[in-house]
Amino acid sequence: MLETICETLVEAYRRNWITSRDGNVSIRHHDRDHFYITPSGVRKQTLQPDQFKKIGIKKGIGTGFANEHTTYHWEVLPYSPISTGLTPSGELPLHFGLQREMGQHRDDVRVVVHLHPTYCVAAMHAGIDLSTIVNDFPELSRYTRVAPNVPDVPPISQELADQCHHNLQLDQDGNINFDIVGIKGHGVVAIDTSPWRAFEHIERLEHICKIVLASKV
Ligand SMILES: [Zn+2]
């Protein structure tokens, strides 16, 4: 599926949803304690599967105030000779939180896609909360659950990761209540069981945002 991720990023670039080095994607299979993430700063038009970074998910038991709780940290694992010289996407904290436990995708695959689609970002810039437009467009709400916008937090920050996880209602078991969340002044994050399914959440929301913005002219 790494090949498929590369294809979705070429298509995202073709649609102006990212500039050359933007966007990042991760993928985890339920029966593996590692996931793959796109490398930082690589042109998405020429991204190859052997350039991905392999990230191990390490569990430990910490002691909280009342109970023992599971703690997690990541470890970059060896993958391919080409990927050795690359670093993981700066949005690794965002992806790690969503990949460390897979929630409703626990028997499947989880793909997390972060892009900068033009009309989604424009709608948020215009002051529209993306979660509020679903009710007027059944073709959107039928297939895609849209979370409330995350405010304009700094890119590649733990704050961005935490706010996205919070608005997606991510719990300790990895369950989420939404398929996509927008980050004001930045982009969106979509989650599903294949690269193209996650891509389609973005495509659907982008199409509706274009309509909404056109109606306000
Ligand atoms: Zn971004």
Image (tube, helix red, strand yellow):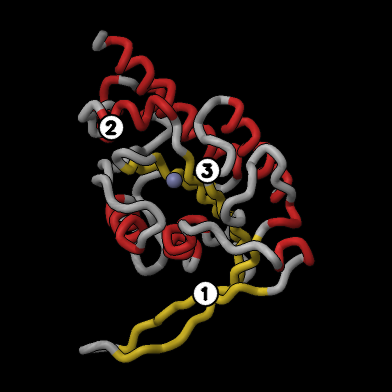
- Mark sitting on residue 74: 1
Residue to which mark 3 is pinned: 22
Quadrant of the image occupied by residue 62: bottom left
Whole-number angstrom distance, CA of label 3 to CA of label 2:
19 Å
Q: Which label lies toward us, 3 or 2?
A: 3
Residue to which mark 2 is pinned: 124
Whole-number angstrom distance, CA of label 1 to CA of label 3:
23 Å
- Mark sitting on residue 151: none
* Callouts 2 and 1 close, C-beta under 8 Å: no
Looking at the rendered structure, the secondary structure element under dot 1 is: strand
Relative horizontal placement of residue 74, taking residue 66 as reference (left or right): right
Relative horizontal placement of residue 45, taking residue 157 as reference (left or right): right
* Crowd band around label 1 with a 10 angstrom C-alpha radius: few (<14), some (14–19), many (20+): some
Whole-number angstrom distance, CA of label 2 to CA of label 1:
32 Å
Residue 101 drawn at (x, y percent)? 47, 67
Q: Amino acid at mark 2?
A: Met
Quadrant of the image occupied by residue 158: bottom left
Q: Which label lies toward us, 1 or 3?
A: 3
Looking at the rendered structure, the secondary structure element under dot 2 is: helix
Relative horizontal placement of residue 124, taking residue 52 as reference (left or right): left
- The mark nearer the N terminus, 1 or 3, is 3
* Crowd band around label 2 with a 10 angstrom C-alpha radius: few (<14), some (14–19), many (20+): many
- The mark nearer the N terminus, 2 or 1, is 1
Relative horizontal placement of residue 170, taking residue 51 as reference (left or right): left
Residue shown at 26%/45% (left/top)?
152
- The mark nearer the N terminus, 3 or 2, is 3
Q: Amino acid at mark 1?
A: Trp
Residue 110 drawn at (x, y percent)? 55, 54
Residue shown at 48%/68% (left/top)?
100
Q: Is mark 3 within 8 Å of ligand 1?
A: yes
Residue 75 drawn at (x, y percent)? 56, 76
Residue shown at 27%/26% (left/top)?
133
